[in-house]
Image (cartoon, helix red, strand yellow):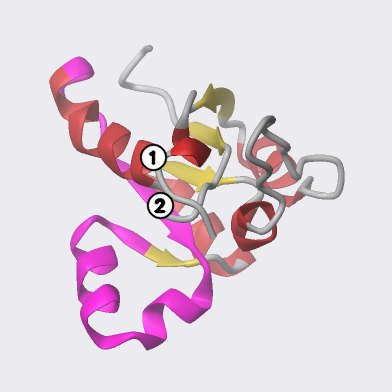
Amino acid sequence: LDTSRRYVFGESPHGVFPIGPVLAGTVVNLCFPGMVVKAVSASNVFKVPILKHFMSWLGAAPATRKNFQLMLKEDCVAVVVGGLMEMYMQEPDRERLKLKSRKGFVKIALEQGADLVPIYHFGNTKIMDI
């Protein structure tokens, strides 16, 4: 990836705990020196004291349109597209994604001239069950 461009990383699936996206975010700078990737996350996450600090330390902010736009003006942004809804769609023998109704991230990327990068985290829903 060209580190001078801005990207929106659309990541799936969510899983009970999105360990794939969190781990992926920690190695971006090793693979693409100079690239800064921030993330948007469910607003409720930022109401839990310890989790709020952890997510902020990772460069995450509540998933609002305004936050997404502000972050994308300066850096790349990662979003787990299916969000919490996708977490509850898990089944033991297949993975399901919540994509059809999730178009806001695409609109923002188009408005700001950012490239979309789809990412699939194989096995992320197998790490933990609800």
Q: Residues within 10 Å of mark 1 (few under 14, many from 20)?
A: many
Query: Which segment did they paint magenta?
Result: 31-60
Q: Which mark is residue 39?
A: 2
**Residue 129: horizontal and vertical position, in percent?**
50, 52
Q: Are marks 2 and 1 in contact (CB under 8 Å)?
A: yes
Residue type at tag 1: Pro
On the rendered structure, is 25 left or right of 7? left
**Residue 74: horizontal and vertical position, in percent?**
37, 46
Q: Nearer the viewer, residue 114 or 87?
A: 87
Q: Residues within 10 Å of mark 2 (few under 14, many from 20)?
A: many
Outermost residue, top direction? 1
Outermost residue, right direction? 100
Residue type at tag 2: Ala
Q: Quadrant of the N terminus?
A: top left
Q: Is residue 75 visible?
A: no
Q: Quadrant of the C terminus?
A: bottom right
**Residue 111: horizontal and vertical position, in percent?**
70, 42
20 vs 54: above or below? above
> How many marks can you see?
2
Q: Is residue 26 magenta?
A: no
Mark 1: which secondary structure? helix
Mark nearest the camera among 2 and 1 is 1
Outermost residue, front direction? 92
67 vs 72: above or below? below
Mark 2: which secondary structure? strand
Q: Is residue 42 visible?
A: yes
Q: Nearer the viewer, residue 82 or 96?
A: 96
How many angstroms separate mark 2 from mark 1 (CA)?
9 Å
Q: Would you name the residue on which mark 1 appears? A: 21
101 vs 49: above or below? above
